[in-house]
Image: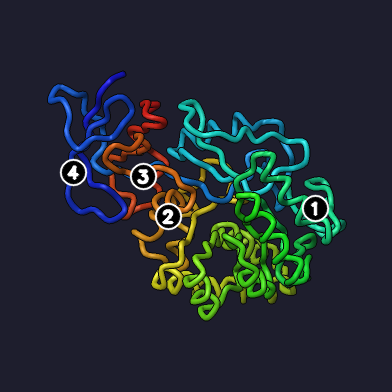
Amino acid sequence: MDAWRVRAVVLPDGDAAEDWWIEGGVLRRSGPRDAEQLPGRFVLPGLVDAHTHVSLEFAGGGAEIVDAVPDALATHLAAGVLAVRDVGAPVGVDVDRGTGRPDRPDVLGGSHYIAPPGRFFPALYEGVDPDDAPERAAAEVRAGASWVKVVADSPITETSFFDPPPNFTPEQLVAIVDRVHEAGGRVAAHVTGTFVAETVRAGVDSIEHGSLVSPALLEEMAARGTAWTPTAGTVLGGVAHLEAAGVEPLLRLARPHLEQLRESIPVAERLGVRVLAGTDMLGHGNLASEVAALRRLGMTPKGALAAASNRPRELFGLPGLAEGGPAELVCYDADPRDDPEVLRAPVAVVHAGRRIV
């Protein structure tokens, strides 16, 4: 296998160029003098999209099931996204889970949605009685899903997305979480309303959306180790769409969510909550837009890059930039801390130890 040298500033925190080598697909701090040097003056661990749906496409505010998972994964890979967490697949869809394949990103998650009948989008799931939900969720883990998507409150109408009723009692949610953990999996919980506090206290591993997370609740999340994927770009885009349409009744519901995100995202970073970047409705390959959205809502440039790289890699058990580890990296000519759009134009990508760009 070829050997390469990387001489670049290691992001998100570095300020001076470092030397790394890749031999046999492994990262080294020393190597052959005649190794080919990869292009790029800045390097990141492979990007991670922590909230995507590789079997869905989003247009006009809705979700459409498409038979194009390979295309979605190829789009992510071309953008330097070397791992994705699929947080909810329609029944009967194979999201192609797996890691270590150079021709596609690592794919984690991919469970079906766990929600009661009539409390989620009908085309995407089969409802389960709340009393049966713990066993159904554990079965997702036994079927290979490392993360199980639980829909903690119901978003099935435009109004209920901003003011949703809970789908489970706190006790039912605790039972689901306990069974998933016993089976060896983790829980990613969709929650957009005030039920987020009970959801955190049920012991879920990550909050998805969670735009009403308060600074006080963030202190609990920091103590518990609960991750947060705020899907900032989806919220910003949704509010912008409502403003353009002049839908004032919904805007009165939506604006407090955006205001709370502006307050809470900087607090989460300061407290050390593991904030993750996820595209959700932004579409495949658009992680740069989510990084930009996190920055618009108050996250530092370094923090926003970490949310798309180091932070999810640590949580998901994926390799970073470490001596003796597998090579998973993306190189850029310019510094994406100055402009997130740089993330769309990697000049070198190494995945599963092989150079693919």
Q: How far apart are marks 4 and 1 (CA)?
A: 49 Å
Q: Which amino acid does label 2 sit on?
A: Arg
Mark 4 and mark 3 residues within 8 Å of each other at the beta carbon: no
Residue density around tag 3, few if under 14, some if 14–19, many if 20 or more, within 10 Å: many
Q: Distance between the residues labelled 2 and 4?
A: 21 Å
Q: How far apart are marks 1 and 2 (CA)?
A: 30 Å
Front position among marks 4 and 3: 3
Q: Mark 1 or mark 2: name the one nearer the start of the chain.
A: 1
Residue 159 seen anywhere in this rendered image of the structure: no
Give residue 330's position: percent from left, percent from top.
35, 38
Give residue 91's position: percent from left, percent from top.
78, 41
Q: What is the number of the mark on residue 311? A: 2
Q: Mark 1 or mark 3: name the one nearer the start of the chain.
A: 1
Q: Distance between the residues labelled 3 and 2?
A: 10 Å
Is residue 37 shown above or below 90?
above
Residue 143 seen anywhere in this rendered image of the structure: yes
Q: Which residue is under mark 1?
A: 121
Q: Which residue is drawn at 48% across and 34% down?
A: 77
Q: What element carries label 2?
A: helix
Q: Which residue is under mark 3?
A: 320
Q: What element carries label 3?
A: loop
Q: Which amino acid does label 1 sit on?
A: Phe
Q: Mark 3 or mark 2: name the one nearer the start of the chain.
A: 2
Residue 191, image quadrant: bottom right
Q: Which residue is drawn at 71% across and 73% down?
A: 248
Is residue 99 shown above or below 217?
above
Is residue 214 shown above or below 226?
below
Q: Which residue is under mark 4?
A: 18
Q: Residue at x 44, y 74 (%)?
A: 267
Q: What element carries label 1?
A: loop
Q: Which of 235 and 36 is in front in this view?
A: 36
Q: Which amino acid does label 3 sit on?
A: Gly
